[in-house]
Image (cartoon, grey):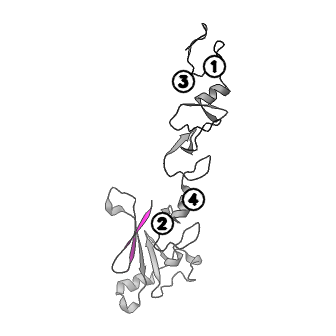
Amino acid sequence: MSVDVMTSKFGNITLKTSTPKKDPGDDDVAILSSFLPEYLMSPAAITKNKAFECSMKRDCRLGDPKATPPGTKKMEYKTRQWHEKCFSCVVCKSAIGTKSFIPREQEVYCATCYEEKFSTRCVKCDKIITSGGVTYKNEPWHRECFTCSHCSTSLAGQRFTSRDEKPYCGDCFGELFAKRCTSCVKPITGTSSATKLVSCNRRICS
């Protein structure tokens, strides 16, 4: 669930998730705004300000979770509130500010840390798979990383055979492991385009 940034002419910044919902009114919305001097606020706004408490509580970066100094910005997301400096990534601790963020359960992540922590990684190179991955034995691979263990030919979309948990293209598997025809001495694999067993008893190869 990523978050996009939109600004308004009033200076407040609304961060709205791009996660599609059945009802547009169900979209998650985070609002970045400023604390104002009381003489500029309505009685209801003053009451709301007095009820403010940063969700960081004892770890509040301003030292006081209830502090509302004029000009200081606050972030409101769902039922929680933070001082802007306290609304930070749970991993790298950097303030989110107006950058994109991804909420997960009760935590907030910057886009970079979320990708590093939760994105699918190739079991061969350990790099993030952004598109075009393949799955072998329930493990994810980049298409370019899923290759024959002997000749390194790409196996994505190709027929292959495995041995000792390692994948091989048909040609390499035949050359390395398959039994050979006693007549032509070519490997009998059933997958090689060069060899086809018609009858073992008659030792006929075609």
Q: Mark 1 against mark 2, which lies toward the viewer?
A: 1
Distance from disc 3 to disc 1, alpha carbons, whole Å, reads 11 Å
Distance from disc 2 to disc 4, alpha carbons, whole Å, reads 13 Å
Q: Are marks 3 and 1 in contact (CB under 8 Å)?
A: no
The reply to whether residue 106 is in sight is no
The amino acid beneath tag 3 is Ser
Distance from disc 1 to disc 2, alpha carbons, whole Å, reads 59 Å
Give the left or right position of residue 93, taking residue 177 as reference: left
Residue 179 or 6: which is nearer the viewer?
Answer: 179
Give percent across and percent down for residue 51. Answer: 45, 81
The numbered dot on residue 193 is: 3
Q: Which residue is tagged 1?
A: 186
The amino acid beneath tag 1 is Lys
Query: In the image, which residues are magenta?
Result: 2-14
Circle 1: element type: loop
Give the left or right position of residue 129, taking residue 32 as reference: right
For image coordinates 55% across by 18% down, the residue present is 196
Crowding near the residue tagged with mark 1, few <14, some 14–19, many ≥20 C-alpha atoms within 10 Å: some
The amino acid beneath tag 2 is Phe
Q: Which residue is tagged 2?
A: 101
User: Which mark is first along the chain, 2 or 3?
Assistant: 2
For image coordinates 37% across by 80% down, the residue present is 11
Q: Which residue is tagged 4?
A: 116
Circle 3: element type: loop
Give percent across and percent down for residue 74. Answer: 46, 78
Q: Mark 3 against mark 2, which lies toward the viewer?
A: 3
Distance from disc 3 to disc 2, alpha carbons, whole Å, reads 52 Å
Give percent across and percent down for residue 60. Answer: 56, 78
Circle 4: element type: helix
